[in-house]
Amino acid sequence: MSKAKKLFDLIMYVNTKRSFTAQDVAYEFNISVRTAHRYLAELSDMGIPIYTEHGRNGGYRTLTNRTLPPIIFEENEAFAIFFAFQLLNYYESLPFKINIDSVSRKLYASLPADTKSKIDRLKSVLLFWNQKKSVPSPYLKEIIEASIENHIVLIEYRSKSENKMKEVKPIGIYATNGFWYMPAYDMEYKMIRLFRVDRILSLEDTKRVFNVATDLENWLTNHAVKKPVRLYVKLTREGIRQCRSESWLEPEIVSTEDENGYIDMDVDLSDIPFISEYFFRLGTDAKVIEPNEVIDYIKQRARKLISHYQ
């Protein structure tokens, strides 16, 4: 076995063992104890956090965080990873303690000179741009852990009118348009509801187990419409352009020969306030024909806005 291969395998070994002696390494890799000490010193020089424990029962140990062995990427794979990091930069909070700049620097430093030069040029002409949201979402990791363990959590949630304490069972989190969202089974309403994570003011894991008969992907793909209401909206060309940026609307857009279009779909009655607010913001680039609940909401908001400026 080559030295490079032994060092590669030794990284895997120390990540698994965490606490070991040079004799353990010598026996595992069929090398002398002296060679084992030398190899471990080389790993330490490479930046792998190995610490010596002195004394009769001494040996070596590694930090809790694991250091992964080197991975060889093709050039296009390196490009994909490097520029995918740009998307994460637009989120104020991430589920785990990820230092995007540090990861990018490590990846960039490992690339050959010609690939670095190409990335430098690409950075001036290729950008995944999203407006960064400055509102933090501090409970992402806790929500993920509760989702995995099927635990009910107690949250204080900032709703439109007041703060409320709620018991919910998260099924996961997902990100869109710079915000994090948590679909969760609401123990009071006996149904899955959607919560903005940045509006969670406090979170406590009750450790109580509750199983929900769906997972995040299935919920997102097959979000059930329990009380269907027809949504019919006429769109201008600009209205079409705006609606295409919304994943829940884009598949339902129908373009007509005059470059205008329309949306004709079923929505859930509980989503009416959200839908009404969205089409109110589109102004004259959208005209809701059905349902009357959305029309009435938009008229009321328009009257309030006019009154506010009079």
Image: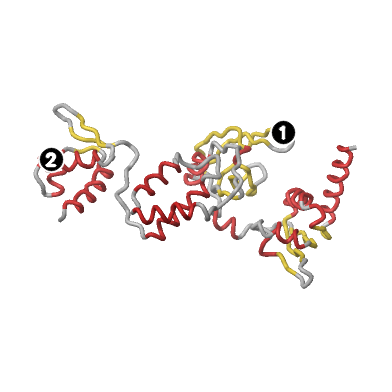
Q: Which numbered marker is on residue 5?
A: none
Which residue: 62% across, 34% down? 156
Image: 264 above or below 300: below
Badge 2: residue crowd in 10 Å (few <14, some 14–19, many ≥20): some
| Relative horizontal placement of residue 192, taking residue 271 as reference (left or right) | left
| Relative horizontal placement of residue 12, taking residue 183 as reference (left or right) | left
* Residue 234: percent from left, percent from top: 80, 62
Mark 1 touching mark 2, by CB under 8 A? Answer: no
Q: Residue furthest right?
A: 310
Residue nearer the viewer, 128 or 290: 128
Residue 124 seen in this snapshot: yes
Check disc 1 and report its element: helix, strand or loop.
Answer: loop
* Residue 212: percent from left, percent from top: 55, 50
Q: Which numbered marker is on residue 23?
A: 2
The amino acid pointed to by label 1 is Glu
Check disc 2 and report its element: helix, strand or loop.
Answer: helix
Q: Which residue carries the number 1 mark?
A: 162
Residue nearer the viewer, 228 or 271: 271
Which residue: 22% across, 50% down? 9
* Residue 70: percent from left, percent from top: 30, 51
Badge 1: residue crowd in 10 Å (few <14, some 14–19, many ≥20): few
Which residue: 26% across, 48% down? 12
